[in-house]
Image (cartoon, rainbow, N blue to C red):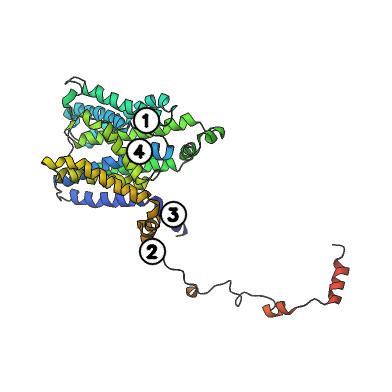
Amino acid sequence: MNNFRKISWHHYINYIVIGILTIVLGSIALAGGRFNSSMLFLLEKVAISMILAVSLSLVVGFLGELSLGHAGFMCVGAYLGGKVAALLEPTLGNSPLNFLIALLVGGGVAALCGVIIGMPALRLRGDYLAIVTLAFGEIVKSIFQNTSDETFGGALGLETPRYDKQYLFIFAFILVLITLAVIQNFIRSKHGRAVTAIRDNEIAARASGINVTKYKLLAFTISATFAGVAGVLYSFSNYTVQSAKFGYNYSIEILVMVVLGGMGSINGSIIAAALITFLNTKLATVLTGDLAVLQNLLYALILIVIVIYNNAPSLKSFRDKYNIGTLLSKLVRKKHDPASIKDDKAKWDVVPTKIEMNEVLSIDITPQDKQGYEKKGGDK
């Protein structure tokens, strides 16, 4: 029971919430319940955004490096994983085995690209690293866009098998849980502490014996791997993979999720990913026709309001007083009432002593006693 109380439950709140959501919705789907197509597609997009935001948070939030090529790694995973799935479809069909093989291929190739790009790029800092990763994303997009129709579909895109939409979101949220497990455990390990030390002060980290290049490359590779996994999930969520989707704007959108959720906050990245994906989807649904031009404007205004609320110094007291954590703690935590303490074994009236306290306080040392004490203990 004591070990149960010692568990830091705030470290696992994201697992609990996403796990409960997956179990409830998955049970409804497996029991024969039917969700409408728009809701299923929204759930898939939310899961993909969560994987992308959490994986990019490892580089931007915990490593402290600015990367704008996350959409490029996702593009690699979507095309390679989708191509493997299309080749295996005549043999395996749209089975979980086909999905698993595609995930391994897409994530593995994205990890390899992360190593190849990371080795030279991570020696750069700041804007230079952002430019290199941005160039990588644009190069990857151009390569797949100019392929032949027989290989990766060219400008029209690659046709990929669409997994059963009634169940794909279950696999998507399971992948979100796996992403959280890997990245959060990495951050809390000695390797994660080395990564955050590099972020705080690279010179001090290098002087203390940390292999800066090794840990930068490790974090960059893990991040690229899960971006590739998100790309494979995207290919199974859509009938066609087009390279135009994985452009500069999409990398910026993923970066906004990380920044909006808070640098180095996994839970914040998850919430921001869900919020931004929901806003984009609903605005695209509501604003149609001539009103479609207002989508980006309203989206930008909403983001500006959220950023101001999260960062304005004048609103700090309001945020601290009315944030979700404070409100929940007020509901759960019991107020400390000294009168409610019973059977206190340290109270003076119950502590067994040889003499009463008033006798101790009334003892005085007379001059004779003092001289006798000095004679006996004078040599001490």
Q: Quadrant of residue 145?
A: top left
Numbered tag placed on residue 55 in the rendering: 4
Q: In the displayed structure, would residue 161 be above or below residue 30? A: above
Q: Is residue 199 left or right of residue 147?
A: right
User: Which residue occupies the foreground of this view, 301 or 341?
Assistant: 301
Question: Residue 130 got which mark?
Answer: 1
Q: Given this view, does label 4 or label 3 mark the residue nearer the observer?
A: 4
What's the distance in space between the residues labelled 2 and 4, CA to CA? 33 Å
Q: Nearer the viewer, residue 334 or 30?
A: 334
Tell me which amino acid carries mark 4.
Ser
Image vertical order of residue 104 relative to residue 303, above or below: above
**Circle nearer the N terminus (4, 3):** 3
Q: What's the mark number on residue 330? A: 2
Most extreme residue toward the left, as rendered? Answer: 289
Q: Which residue is mark 3?
A: 7
Three-letter code for the amino acid on which mark 1 is drawn? Ala
Q: Position of residue 24 (x, y in %)?
A: 24, 52
Q: Earlier in the sequence, mark 2 or mark 1?
A: 1
Q: Quadrant of the N terminus?
A: bottom left
Residue nearest the observer in this picture, 267 or 226? 267
- The correct choice, above or below, for 101 with respect to 61 in the image is above
Residue lying at 18% horizontally and 49% vertically, measured from the top left? 29
- Give the foreground label among 2 and 1: 1
